[in-house]
Image (spheres, helix red, strand yellow):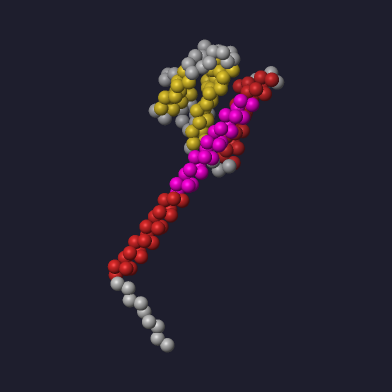
Amino acid sequence: MKLKYINMDKKGQFYIFASIVLSTVIFFTVINRIVLQDADKEFNYVYENYIYEANKVINNAVFSQSNISNQFSNYTLDFIEYIKSKNSDMGISYMLIFQNDIRIVNYLNGPIYYNRQYLIEKSDQRLFRNAGNFSIVYNNRTYYYGLDSSESIQFKALVEKI
């Protein structure tokens, strides 16, 4: 029994090959976009969770008359470890304003500057007196924070996906 071969001209082969290549490119482009959107959603979820739980930690420390700075520092370190266990990584710098003092703690990937002049290295913290509106410089970007004088305890954060 003889097999008959279908003779295709080169133009038809080119169109089939081009459609396969184009389909592959479109497929991988769509897959990459979906993965990136999921990663952004996950980061936003983790960020929102950090802020939500931070308020609870502060309220609990006030209610139990505990040291707010220590409670919050422990919470942040535990949160960073939790994030690492989920194969995600984010840097956090937080500012805790209490009784007209501001404690700035830096767990970002590099140094930050408070009001463009005071350096706070990675994994370091500093206490400043007479807190007012302030700025934080990180990675050549300036972030401005305003304070509400009617609030006795305030919390501000700078979070980045690493």
Q: Tell me where residue 154 appears, x and y as whole percent.
A: 57, 19
Q: Residue lying furthest bottom in this view?
A: 1
Q: Nearer the viewer, residue 84 or 151?
A: 151
Count of numbered badges drawn on the protein: 0
Look at the image and tell me whether residue 130 can be seen: yes
Q: Residue at x 41, y 27 (%)?
A: 141
Q: Residue at x 51, y 33 (%)?
A: 91
Q: Nearer the viewer, residue 39 or 12?
A: 12
Q: Is residue 78 above or below residue 103?
A: below
Quadrant of res 15: bottom left
* In this picture, residue 61 sits left or right of residue 120: right
Q: Nearer the viewer, residue 110 or 79?
A: 79
Quadrant location, the N terminus = bottom left
* In this picture, residue 89 sits left or right of residue 17: right
Q: Tell me where residue 33 appears, x and y as whole percent.
A: 45, 46
Q: Is residue 53 above or below residue 145?
A: below
* In this picture, residue 10 sits left or right of residue 122: left
Quadrant of res 88: top right
Q: Residue at x 52, y 40 (%)?
A: 41
Report if residue 39 lies within the magenta region: yes
Q: Residue at x 32, y 68 (%)?
A: 12
Look at the image and tell me whether residue 114 can be seen: no
Report if residue 76 lies within the magenta region: no
Name the main secondary structure of what is drawn in magenta. helix
Give the residues drawn in magenta, as a range. 32-56
Q: Tell me where residue 95 appears, x and y as whole percent.
A: 53, 22
Q: Nearer the viewer, residue 46 or 119?
A: 46
Quadrant of res 59: top right
Q: Tell me where residue 23 appears, x and y as whole percent.
A: 40, 58
